[in-house]
């Protein structure tokens, strides 16, 4: 992967053609959670190429991340680290579809980064779901307003109980559908909102077991969360700022479990010689969604508490940062305790 990164600099013509991306993150993590303490370095590496041939979309990516292991830990007797296929997809995008100016259609099939705007309660951003994605988008002629309808069918695991045949079936699925809108008020001010409904169709025992370790109750089987997201970006007083918020509700639980996440950021990220400062708060009840897919930095689910982070970007492609989170448990669990999380990171991205 290091050779891959060097090739991006050495061959700019090739870079334009294959559209490569590279991301490496080195992290030192200290987690203080009674009986579940963690300490040590971790590494995350991802490299891919994403060629586009007129209307055809393709992608191929390798990375170190797996479903039940968020990073590769650097303390296991110098053993080699696993690298797997994290993206491999084929799709197409048609602009001016049906001869309507501003209307575009996109279809993807394979394993890919989720194109939807989702909260960290629902999805860890490093996850690459597998399945199908459909998007119908209309951008008004002014270029300042965009609306879209999306749907996705993600294959969650290989096996699940078959309710009708009383035997094993091949797949359990996640079905997602929703709408989003984006308004570009001026060059530096925009607002984006979305609402999505999910159906986790009979999650497998393996995925449910991971979820129980990460905050789900052992008795919950129905996950049909609905989420609403909002993101606002502006530059008041010549200082870039953003506000992101998400609300999640699972009406399939007996007590209508809920969760929310809000984050405020100041400073332009991934710009040379810039600082950024983040403050966030999370509240996520145990069964608001499938904890197996939730963000690890938020302590997964069954958590509440604040998180702060300070980052410096010495170059457009390099980030250094520290973060701290104090996450209490909402419900008593044998797999979770109140948690304090301190991290230092160095990240390369281009």
Image (cartoon, rainbow, N blue to C red):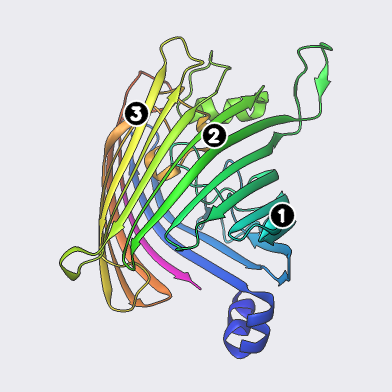
Residue 300 is at least partly visible in this image? no
Q: Secondary structure at mark 1?
A: helix
In percent of width and height, residue 32 lies at 31, 40
Answer few, some or many: residues within 10 Å of disc 2's Cα (few below 14, many 20 plus, some between 14 and 19): many
Q: Which mark is in front, 2 or 1? A: 1
Answer few, some or many: residues within 10 Å of disc 3's Cα (few below 14, many 20 plus, some between 14 and 19): many
Magenta range is 342-350
Q: Which mark is residue 292?
A: 2
* Viewer-closest of 163 and 238: 238
Do residues under tags 2 and 1 come within 8 Å of each other at their CB atoms?
no
Comes first in the chain, label 3 or label 2: 2
Q: Which mark is in front, 3 or 1? A: 1
In percent of width and height, residue 95 lies at 66, 62
Q: Which mark is residue 39?
A: none
In percent of width and height, residue 83 lies at 66, 59
In the displayed structure image, the side of residue 254 where residue 206 appears, left or right? right
Q: Is residue 207 above or below residue 97?
A: above
Name the residue rendered at 31%, 57% in the picture: 233
Residue underneath mark 1: 98
Q: Which mark is in front, 3 or 2? A: 2
Q: Is residue 119 above or below residue 59?
A: above
Residue 5 is at least partly visible in this image? yes
Q: Quadrant of the N terminus?
A: bottom right
Looking at the image, the residue that sits furthest to the left is: 237
Q: Which mark is residue 337?
A: 3
Q: Is residue 212 above or below residue 105?
A: above
Residue 343 painted magenta? yes
């Amino acid at each position: 992967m290091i050779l891959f990164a060097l090739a991006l600099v050495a061959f700019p013509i090739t870079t334009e053609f294959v559209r490569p991306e590279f991301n490496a993150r080195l992290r030192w993590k200290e987690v203080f959670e009674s009986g579940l303490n963690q300490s040590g370095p971790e590494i995350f590496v991802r490299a891919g190429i994403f060629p586009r041939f007129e209307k055809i979309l393709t992608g191929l990516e390798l990375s170190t991340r797996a479903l039940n292991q968020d990073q590769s830990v650097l303390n296991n007797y110098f053993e080699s680290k696993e690298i797997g296929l994290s993206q491999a997809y084929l799709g197409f995008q048609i602009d001016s579809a049906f001869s309507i100016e501003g209307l575009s259609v996109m279809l993807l099939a394979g394993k890919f980064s989720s194109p939807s705007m989702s909260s960290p309660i629902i999805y860890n951003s490093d996850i690459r779901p597998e399945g199908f994605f459909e998007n119908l988008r209309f951008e008004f002629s002014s270029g300042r307003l965009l609306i879209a309808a999306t749907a996705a069918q993600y294959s969650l695991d290989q096996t699940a109980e078959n309710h009708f045949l009383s035997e094993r079936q091949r797949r359990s699925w996640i079905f997602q559908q929703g709408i989003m809108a984006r308004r570009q008020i001026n060059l530096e001010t925009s607002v984006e909102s979305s609402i999505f409904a999910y159906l986790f169709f009979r999650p497998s025992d393996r995925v449910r077991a991971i979820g129980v370790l990460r905050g789900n109750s052992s008795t919950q089987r129905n996950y049909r969360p609905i989420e609403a997201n909002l993101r606002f970006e502006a530059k008041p007083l010549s200082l870039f700022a953003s506000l992101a918020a998400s609300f999640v509700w699972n009406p399939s639980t007996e007590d209508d479990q809920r969760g929310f996440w809000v984050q405020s950021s100041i400073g332009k990220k991934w710009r040379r010689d810039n600082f950024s400062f983040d403050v966030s708060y999370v509240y996520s009840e145990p069964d608001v969604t499938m904890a197996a897919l939730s963000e690890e930095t938020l302590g997964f689910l069954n958590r509440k508490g604040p998180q702060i982070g300070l980052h410096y970007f010495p170059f457009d492609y390099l980030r250094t940062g520290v973060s701290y989170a104090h996450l209490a448990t909402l419900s008593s669990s044998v797999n979770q305790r109140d948690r304090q999380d301190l991290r230092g990171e160095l990240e390369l991205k281009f």
